[in-house]
Image (cartoon, rainbow, N blue to C red):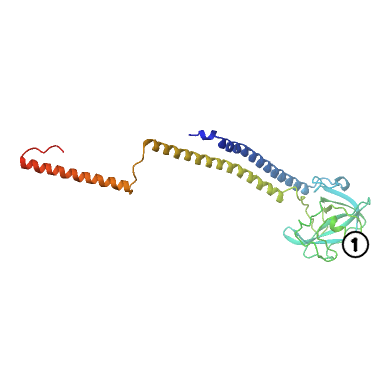
Amino acid sequence: MYRFLLTPRWWAINLFVVLSIPVCLIAGTWQLARFEDQVDSHREQQERAEATDAPRPLAELLPLTTETVGRQAEVTGTYDVEQQLLVPERMLEGKRGYFVLTPLRPADGGPAVPVVRGWLPGAADDAAPPAPPEGEVTVTGALQAAESPSKVTTPTTGLPAGQLGVIGAASLINVLPYDVSDSWITVRDAEEPMAAVPAEAPTGTGLDMDAFQNLGYTAEWFVFAAFAVFMWFRLFRREVESQHDAELERLLTDAGTPAAEPGTAAATATADAGTAGTVAGTATTADASDAAVRTGSPAPPA
């Protein structure tokens, strides 16, 4: 019954299925592992951003990497209050407000460091933020990567003078009259009435669109494996049914010509002949019986 599995056609089908299933499972497992790695990376970045470990000098954490983003850094310098900027339309704990960004000129003469000193509710107002400390200060806070314009959901262009849409060297270089670092610091302890801005995990290392694409690819590969098994079973079942029908037809052919189907001309003629024979037989029997009665002899057997 199943000898068809040894035909060249079915050898090709079986080989394809046997090879495709492990390939799909391996690819799906790999995509799932990538998703889990990004989840773990996101968790580590969040824990690092929320940590309050001992700060390290800013120079030791540069150039910025995914390992140093969120680390507590410290830098000594002087605030440039004349170049202070406001970053409007920023949310904190469900409330709309703005960041207060003041450049810090490092004492070692390096590029200026953008420092987000805190957050205030409401519309951006130059008169609302408290003045930064005068003289040389040491700033401690979480080191952050430059923002990407594509990731910022607030307006980034057409802002009034003294306001900034994206925190990064690409936008600050057109505003500040000196070199500026591409990373920035959000202070750990903000001055009243400002609220400290929490650090954020860097993009591209956690639960972003790429991570969920990996999860979607995982489902697709597993579905492909299941579909290969389903199609093989469907083809196998169809082949078995075809073999069964062919065997049944062969048996009927070997047994002879099948009887005429009801309703055909041959079947009607056969029925008419049978009926006529029955009527003739009945008439002959009746005549013989009448003759026996008249002569008193027993009727011949029918």
Label 1 Cα neighbours within 10 Å, binned few <14 / some 14-19 / many ≥20: few
Identify which residue is drawn at 31% across, 46% down: 267
Q: Where is residue 216 in the image (x, y as percent from the top left)?
A: 65, 48
The quarter of the rendered structure image containing the C terminus is top left
Q: Where is residue 201 in the image (x, y as percent from the top left)?
A: 76, 50
Q: Which of 279 and 132 is in front in this view?
A: 279
Identify which residue is drawn at 8% across, 40% down: 292
180 with respect to 18 (left or right): right
Residue carrying label 1: 82
199 with respect to 232 (left or right): right
Q: In this view, does 70 lie above or below 98?
A: above
User: Given the image, on which type of amino acid does mark 1 rest?
Assistant: Glu
Q: Position of residue 96 (x, y in %)?
A: 75, 62
Under circle 1, the secondary element is: helix
Q: Is residue 243 above or below residue 166?
A: above
Quarter of the rendering containing residue 293 = top left
160 with respect to 289 (left or right): right
How many numbered circles does the render carry? 1
Identify which residue is drawn at 68% across, 41% down: 30
Q: Can residue 103 be seen?
A: yes
Q: Nearer the viewer, residue 167 or 174?
A: 174
Quarter of the rendering containing residue 78 = bottom right
Q: Is residue 96 above or below residue 284?
A: below
Q: Position of residue 210 (x, y in %)?
A: 71, 49
Identify which residue is drawn at 9% across, 42% down: 291
Quarter of the rendering containing residue 223 = top right
Q: Can residue 207 be seen?
A: no
Q: Which of 18 and 116 is in front in this view?
A: 18
